[in-house]
Image: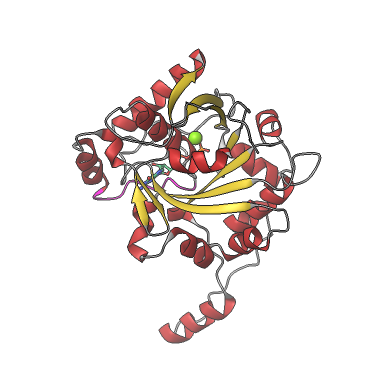
Amino acid sequence: MADAKTDHVSISVIGLPGSGKTTFLAALWELVGERRVTKVLTFDTIGENDHSYLRKIVAVWRKATEQARTRLTGLSAVKMNLKDAEGGVVQITMPDAPGEDFRAMWEDRELGRVLGESLADGNILLFVNGNKVKAPAWVAERAAQRKATGRQKAETLPKGWNPSLAPTQVQLVDLLQLISHAPVGAARRKIVVMISAWDKVEGEKLAPDAFLKEKLPLLAQYLEAGRDGWTSRVYGVSAQGGEYDGNDANSEPVEGRGPQKAGKGRDADRLREVGIPADRIRLVFGEKASNDLTEPLQWLMY
Ligand SMILES: Nc1nc2c(ncn2[C@@H]2O[C@H](COP(=O)(O)OP(=O)(O)OP(=O)(O)O)[C@@H](O)[C@H]2O)c(=O)[nH]1
Ligand SMILES: [Mg+2]
């Protein structure tokens, strides 16, 4: 996208509700302000309004509390200027659009204003909550399970299909196809798939790209096939480092926010005790792990 360092490169943060977008932004802002941790991109400048929004979400993040759901009416475009080692400055526009907007794109074929503007060009940071992947269930698997447990097929009334019942990856592939073509967007861009809540899934001992292939094969194959010209990378990110305490503002249940579980508070207590809060962050790419959230952003810049 950008050959010259002065070009304005935009990165759009997208993902369904509860996919980890706001938490990532908060962790990124914490990291960028932390002098004791090295990173490939450092802070340059930021707008005044964005500053107060970021300050707010970082305060929540430091307390090890979940972010409140991003509201449709809330401030949603964060512009941040970061610079690399050579002093080149790049503007990163991160429309932290509420996940509802993305859901509306799929369910109602509606495109919100914030999204329409931000998805026209630039590269993409796509969030998928690894802990909440709605994996497709195979009829044959279900049948084998019933056979093994000796249970009869439950008598259920047929339910009407509704777009919200579609698996996560079907919704995401549709979204990416939509933004790869006029009038919404353009093809041949770079995309980073961020599998969030990595602390919840790394016990499965899969590298992030292997996790994507196994849990979201349709999305992995769509990106690999390259029909819309995506150049992709897959990262696993734990922007919290573990489970945070619940946020009272999130009263209605949403995908990605289950009920409070036992042991949850203990995770948050442990995280609050980490000396340098930015050290809670973990980013995994292939076999490598670090806490430098700016590394995928640097990859998306050029
Ligand atoms: N365990 C764990 N949970 C996480 C992590 N990052 C995010 N989550 C949880 O995932 C849920 C969604 O995170 P948000 O950052 O609010 O998601 P969002 O994409 O901004 O959601 P909307 O604003 O509703 O679109 C929350 O319950 C978070 O606490 C992580 O690193 N580890
Ligand atoms: Mg949010």
Q: Is residue 192 magenta?
A: no
Q: Which residues are magenta?
A: 255-263
- The residue drawn where x is 41% and y is 33% is 28
Pick the quarter of the image with the C terminus: top right
Q: Residue at x 78, y 46 (%)?
A: 181
The spot of residue 16 in percent (x, y) is 56, 45
**What's the colour scheme?**
secondary structure
Q: Residue at x 50, y 39 (%)?
A: 298
Between 24 and 299, which is closer to the camera in this rendering?
A: 299
Which of the 4 image quarters holds residue 76?
A: top right
Q: Which SS does the magenta portion mostly show? A: loop
Query: Can residue 267 be seen here?
Result: yes
Q: Nearer the viewer, residue 262 or 196?
A: 196
Q: Position of residue 169 (x, y in %)?
A: 60, 57
Judged from the image, the quadrant occupied by ligand 1 is top left
Which quadrant of the figure has residue 102?
A: top right
Residue appearing at x 50%, y 83% in the figure: 144
Outermost residue, right side: 183
Q: Furthest-front residue in view?
A: 86
Q: Is residue 21 above or below residue 285?
A: above
Q: For the N terminus, give its image quadrant.
A: top right
Q: Is residue 67 visible?
A: no
Q: How many marks?
A: 0
Q: Is residue 257 magenta?
A: yes
